[in-house]
Image: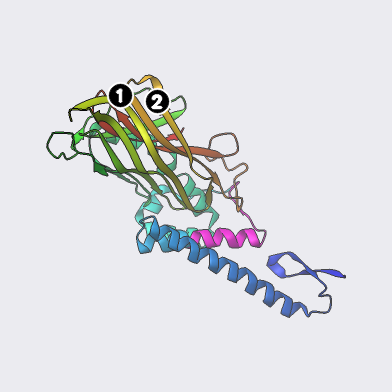
Amino acid sequence: MKQTAIVLGSLGSILFTGMACVPSVYAQTTTNSNIQSQVQSVYQSKYNELLQAGLSQQDAQYYAQLTAEDQQLKLQNKTINLANVNAIAQNVIAADPQAFRQKILNGDPSAIKAAFESKAFTQGMSDLAALVKSNPGQTTYTLQYPDGSKIVDTITPGTIQKTPNGPDVTPTSASPSSAVTPQGYTESTTAVNYAGFGGSGWQNTVKLYAGAAFAQVQVFDFHYTVGKEDVNGNYVPTAPTINGYQAGATSAGFIASGAAAKDTETNPNGLTNTAQGAATTEWTISSSVGISGAGLSFSVPSNHAWQEYAILRVNGNADTISDVAAEYS
């Protein structure tokens, strides 16, 4: 069967099979239509996914548009090259964050480079760690940056099993347990008291809203036990045990994430009487963005990727569940 490569302007060479006599104008229209159909499908799927993740309609639309733009560039074999590009100054961005977002949607390399140089990427987790340290025991922490980026870290209490022969209990804030941060990571930790001998449905969600990307990592449907009822109906403490949980990761825009990996540990980082469940994921900058020679300061040298994790940690000594968030730095 005869094969013909038809040059379609900015779309590059598309290989057709058995279509040597098809007029090039028709072929270009057909190819453009196919690409737009795929791009629209990507947009709708990502929009629905982000709404499900709890984003506002406005944010879901924006990040779905970025994801669709990323897909279109890939289908057209195009790259936005950030090398030798001067990023838009942060004070210019801060003066009009919405105009900055529009430049990113338009594929402006200077805007996209500035978005990846946002403090949300370069120092977000260290800022979060400082915020948590100065305000322990909260269940939600939000960092807002002048360029419109933000980081939101939330621990959502689930149900708590009633202490045998005791009153109903409600979680209250507490200072987090100290721990040794793994080498290379910047970590933030907060905690709430638990009471009773177990619980279910607890959740820890870390969300990064940046100009060029959205990223989320999450531990959810977290079940644990820290005690049991003896034959006389009295409460007996036991070593903290994680009975199960789910891990999830979501990304949008000019980054991509792998599936969230689950990692359950006992007595991590030298802690005692502690169990934790973690969701870990690795983010990479999309292949539609050329970063060779761009000098992006937040990137881990190997492969321009970085890791992020969310943890729920049960400490039997302090009777707390800790919400831990971190990224490789």
296 or 178: nearer the eye?
178
Q: Is residue 328 left or right of residue 312?
A: right
Label 2 and label 1: CA atoms lie apart by: 15 Å
Work out whether mark 2 precedes mark 1 in sequence or the reverse, and give the earlier one.
1
Q: Is residue 266 above or below residue 103?
A: above
Q: Secondary structure at mark 1?
A: loop
Q: Is residue 293 above or below residue 314?
A: below
The x and y percentages for residue 60 are 41, 61
Q: Which residue is mark 1?
A: 178
The residue carrying mark 2 is 266
Q: Tell me where residue 312 appears, x and y as whole percent.
A: 35, 36
Q: Is residue 44 magenta?
A: no
Work out whether residue 231 or residue 24 is closer to the camera in this orientation and state it.
Answer: 231
Which residue appears farthest toward the front when viewing the image?
231
Residue depicted at 73% across the width and 79% down the height = 25
**Which contiguous range is marked in magenta?**
65-84
Q: Is residue 325 above or below residue 13?
A: above
The N terminus sits in image quarter: bottom right
Are the residues tagged 2 and 1 within 8 Å (C-beta)?
no
The residue lying at 30 percent from left, 42 percent from top is 200
Tell which residue pokes out farthest to the right in this image.
1
